[in-house]
Amino acid sequence: MLRVAIPYGTLSSDQLRALAFVARRYDKGYGHFTTRQNIQFNWIKLEETPDLLHYLAKNKIHGIQTSGNVIRNVTSDHFAGATVDEVEDPRIYAEIIRQWSTLHPEFTFLPRKFKIAVISSNEDRAATRFHDIGLILHNDVNGKKGFEVIVGGGMGRTPVIGTTIKNFLPKEDLISYLEAILRVYNRYGRRDNIYKARIKILVRELGVDAFKNQVEQEWLVIDRNLINHSQGEETRIREMFKEPDFYNKTFSINNNHPNEPDFQNWLKSNIYKHKNPDFRIVSISLKPIGGIPGDATAEQMDLVADLAQKYSFDEIRVSHEQNLILPHVHESELGDLWISLRKAKLATPNSGFITDMIACPGLDYCSLANARSIPVAQSISNKFKDIAKQYDIGNLKIKISGCINACGHHHAGHIGLLGVDRNGEEFYQITLGGSGEDDASIGKIIGPGFSKDKIVEAVELIVQVYLENRSSGETFLSFYRREGAKPFKESLYGSV
Amino acid sequence: MAVYNVEGIVQDKWKFVNNFENISSLRGSVIIPLEILVKSDKSFLCGLENVGVKLNVDSEPEELVEYINLLEIICIYFPIFKDGRGFSLARILRDKYSFKGDIRAIGDVLLDQASFLFRVGFSTINFPQNPSPQDFEDSIKRYHAVYQKTNDAHKTIQNLRLRDSRR
């Protein structure tokens, strides 16, 4: 498997075409977008890898630090630079961190992998609190910009919601403070047991206050003038992320909005508010009914690249929920865009609904997995294919991991499914009530797991319990938070 | 075993001592483990031309403070290449304790790590695998541009951009 880094999930049309080329020339014609805004190719021949990497490098793409005990690809909000609710485009800082963390001489042999996410809005679309370091940009009372610094979140076998160790870190001090955190982690993170080597365990074993204290002590002796990024560089980077000249092109004036229900559904579910009232953010679903979550064919990638060039100022985003985003689409062009997407099976109107699942590659591709994720996701998708039913169920996030490493974010799923191996048979444990957003929570195991033949039925039952007992307007998550596990347990396992 | 500084192979005058035996009869340039230096009375130091200390990657530099001015060299022993604590330790010795002598990486260090080691403050590396001078040079020149500001002579990419923009 080759994992290719897509920093903060941002691609140009040319870069996406390069990935399409790799899929076609070096793989079986498709790629898999991941929960870390990256792409993976599963059928690369080892002997062709040097040529492939050379080709990627020519297109300014690489796979450095997508594996190993290093600072991994920095992730961010997939609506960055387009959403109404942000303080500033968080990718400016994600890029500063990308530069700092690339081949860092001191932090390339860490106790374990290290993941950083940066956002700048109240709504958390990047599972920020589940990262080794989560950074939330905000303004203080004087209008100065700085970060809330959250440390020690993570999924894996020990899911933890990160803890805030600093409410306001002036943005100028970002890199020196990260350096202090990483130095404390590099020196004191456990190296005797890889399952206890993430920073979350260090924070837990030291206690948050002691950890924070060590970081602050370290930060005091760091030469901040030397280590911090320069304001000149920040300005240069800010320029790279400045918003496109929205009106420097002509838009179709025919307002070709198809009169079909599918289009109306798509408008309702896959279109998000843009900071410019004439524009929309479009989510391109990589979750067709019965499909493999996050997979895209080379043809689909080429098409999205073309559409981004035509309709979205040459920009594409990869979301951690394994969809593609066109961040800047003029309202008048939504109809034309939809017609093109539909032809390529890219217009499933299910963004945020039950069939918009996260699933890891699972046993089909991954040597660590205990169970398959993809066929379970496909069966659930087929079971709930009726779009009216999906809309009735409302916002419901199912997240599926094929093993305890939790690449499918099951801990953060409203319904989480974890594949386990029970005497050579694939079983699935169900957790309920997780959330990866600003109201982050870790799902709780509901009871004994279900075999692969029973798991879809169990999910259906859970949804049924919600539908029959919810109050008006109540989402699945709020219902669970109000009622707890009891009604679900009774329905799944009988009265207890 | 070849010892390199950033320019190439260097002569090695140092002798490692690993126990207390005959400590008072030691002569010449000697590297002593930190725990021995801490526990012994310091009279044996009089017989020595030069003194160095050997640290483990988990040593606390605070223990070294009172001797640091005596030392010409500090060796940091890597039990395995992927134990990156030694990188931070070297950085701390340079930045926090302003140690100006030789800091040498010993133990399981890889040629691929040479550039990283020099950049965090190591001045010499004792490679167990005895690389050729050509391989060494190829390794440290592999990445000609760096992003991070450290205390070495590398110009950062930001510096280079600034320079280019002023031309």
Image: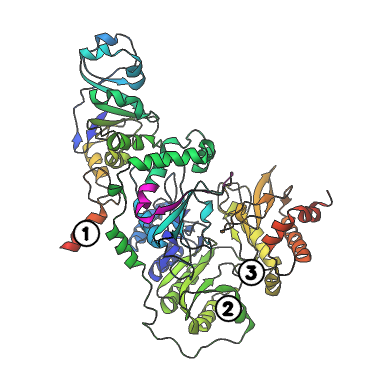
Can residue A401 be spotted in the picture? no
- Using the image, name the chain to which the residue with label 3 belongs: A
Labels 2 and 3 share a subunit: yes
- Using the image, name the chain to which the residue with label 1 belongs: B
Q: Earlier in the sequence, mark 2 or mark 3?
A: 2
Given residues B155 and A363, the one toward you in this image is: B155
Q: CA distance from mark 1 to mark 2?
A: 46 Å
Q: State the SS at label 1.
A: helix
**Which amino acid lies under the numbered mark 2 shown in the image of this protein?**
Leu
Which residues are the magenta region?
A156-177
Q: State the SS at label 3.
A: loop
Q: CA distance from mark 2 to mark 3?
A: 18 Å
Which one is closest to the eye, mark 2 or mark 3?
A: 2
- Using the image, name the chain to which the residue with label 2 belongs: A
Q: Are marks 2 and 3 in contact (CB under 8 Å)?
A: no
Labels 1 and 3 share a subunit: no
Can residue A53 be spotted in the picture? yes
Toward the left, the furthest residue is B167
| The magenta stretch spans residue A169 | yes
Given residues A110 and B79, the one toward you in this image is: A110
Residue that numbered label 2 is attached to: A267
| The magenta stretch spans residue A340 | no
**Which amino acid lies under the numbered mark 1 shown in the image of this protein?**
Leu
Residue that numbered label 3 is attached to: A289
Q: CA distance from mark 1 to mark 3?
A: 52 Å
- From the top left corner, tell me how far across and down residue A472 is, in percent: 73, 69
Residue that numbered label 1 is attached to: B162
